[in-house]
Image (cartoon, grey):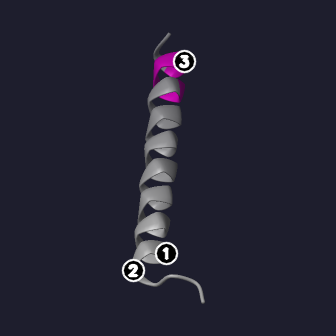
């Protein structure tokens, strides 16, 4: 159970990281629009 729970938490953290990266990328694009 502990292993499974740890796996779930890491998966959530990875998803959160991906979301943050996506947000950062979009913000950069907004600031510097592609010509």
Confirm or deny contact between disc 3 and disc 2 (CB under 8 A).
Answer: no
Q: CA distance from mark 1 to mark 3?
A: 38 Å
| Rendered residue at 45%/84% (across/down) | 32
Q: Main secondary structure of the magenta part?
A: helix
In depth, the one of 13 and 33 nearer the eye is 33
What residue is pinned by disc 1?
Answer: 29
What residue is pinned by disc 3?
Answer: 4
Q: Secondary structure at mark 1?
A: helix
| Rendered residue at 54%/27% (across/down) | 7
| Rendered residue at 46%/16% (across/down) | 2
In depth, the one of 25 and 35 nearer the eye is 35
Residue numbers of the magenta segment: 3-7
| Disc 1 residue crowd, few under 14, some 14–19, many 20+, Cα 10 Å | few
Q: Secondary structure at mark 2?
A: helix
- Position of the C terminus by quadrant: bottom right
The earlier-in-sequence mark between 1 and 3 is: 3
What residue is pinned by disc 2?
Answer: 31
Residue 33 belongs to the span the image colors magenta: no
| Disc 2 residue crowd, few under 14, some 14–19, many 20+, Cα 10 Å | few
In depth, the one of 3 and 20 nearer the eye is 20
Q: Give the quadrant of residue 30.
A: bottom left
- Give how far across and how far down residue 16 sits, in percent: 43, 43
Left or right: 1 as drawn, with respect to 27: right
Q: CA distance from mark 3 to mark 2?
A: 41 Å
1 w.r.t. 20: above or below: above
Q: CA distance from mark 2 to mark 1?
A: 5 Å
Confirm or deny contact between disc 2 and disc 1 (CB under 8 A).
Answer: yes
* Closer mark to the observer between disc 3 and disc 2: 2
Residue positioned most to the right: 35
């Amino acid at each position: 159970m502990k292993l499974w729970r740890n796996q779930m938490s890491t998966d959530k953290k990875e998803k959160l990281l991906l979301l943050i990266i996506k947000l950062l990328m979009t913000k950069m694009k907004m600031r510097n629009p592609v010509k």
